[in-house]
Image (cartoon, rainbow, N blue to C red):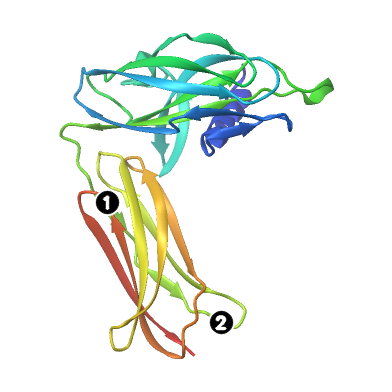
Amino acid sequence: MNAAMRKEILMLLAAALASTTALVAGTGEVSVSPAVVMLRGNVGQSTTQTLTFTNGTSRPLSFEMKAYDAAVHDGNRLFVEAGSMPGSIAATAAFSPRLFTVPPRQSVLVSLTITIPPHPAVRAIAVMCEGTTKLGTGPMRVSASVGTLLTFAIAGDVLAATASPLTVQPPTDSATLVAAQQLVNSGTEPLVATGMLAILDAAGSLAGKQEIPMWRLLPGEKKDMRVEYDGTLVPGRYRAMITYDLTEKTLTSIAEFSVK
């Protein structure tokens, strides 16, 4: 397999992890649960997880289990093959079974055991159930794959995040208000967070709010936050305040703006 093909495959893995299910040519869907597993432990500790793969299609499907390390480069997450970097957690993954076939409308349980190496280089792995059954006809034959993301918080890890200055694009007759900034996981522990945009008027009263759905960042990973508020604001001076709940601490940013 050449480098271009390998890169394309790993990009497809990232796309598969963006959803808990993979649609299969209109005949049903393949799903995995849980879609995300968050673990805490110590170096050298092993853990065993049970994953459930469900074949909602009308035909039997065969799969192979593989694990990939979730690394971060220049603030972006990418998936690399197990063992290709020192301190690979994915290289310790043991599946039972590794190869299996799921009958139509049924599920299969897969046991996964992972051991945290002495000097782990990453804090997450992608566990992929890669389809080996080809679907369709002719040159457009495809396979169905789904994945689970496992994150690791290791004893002694540091939970920290930094944010760029908050910018606000005030609402207009044709555009909604947009609050934006970049967040960086500046610690060594994976972040799982939610947030809230609050809009205060000149008197300090709450004029509106918008919930920010849950998101996660690996150490060193960056995220461009963009929060839209489509409520109505009368002309005047306002203050936008975004607060992120990082489980163990909070991070708040404030910016002032005017509505004409």
Q: Residue at x 39, y 50 (%)?
A: 214
Instruction: Tell me where residue 12 appears, x and y as whole percent.
Output: 59, 31
Q: Horizontally, is 31 left or right of 218 in the view? A: right
Give neighbour class at mark 1: few <14, some 14-19, many 20+ (Cα, 10 Å): some
Furthest-front residue in view?
105
Name the one closer to the observer, 7 or 233.
233
Relative to 185, say whether 229 is above or below. below
Residue 145 point in image, percent of width and height: 59, 25
Q: Residue furthest right?
A: 138
Q: Position of residue 70 (x, y in %)?
A: 41, 31
Which badge, 1 or 2, comes first in the chain's sequence? 2
Local crowd size for mark 2, using a 10 Å CA cut-off: few (<14), some (14–19), many (≥20): few
Residue lying at 82% horizontally and 21% vertically, measured from the top left:
137
Q: Is residue 153 left or right of residue 260?
A: left
Horizontal side of residue 109 vs 253, given as left or right: right
Q: Which residue is mark 1?
A: 246
Residue for badge 2 = 172
Task: Kindly identify the amino acid type of the residue bearing the numbered disc 1.
Answer: Leu
Q: Quadrant of residue 59?
A: top right
Q: How many marks?
A: 2
The numbered mark at residue 83 is none
Tags 1 and 2 touching, CB below 8 Å: no
| Helix, strand or loop status at disc 2 | loop
208 lies above or below 19: below
Residue at the spot x=46%, y=29% of the render?
33
Amino acid under label 2? Thr
Find numbered disc 1 in the image and state the secondary structure of the residue it sits on.
loop
Q: Quadrant of the N terminus?
A: top right
The residues tagged by marks 1 and 2 sit, at their Cα atoms, a distance apart of 32 Å
Query: In front: 67, or 148?
Result: 148
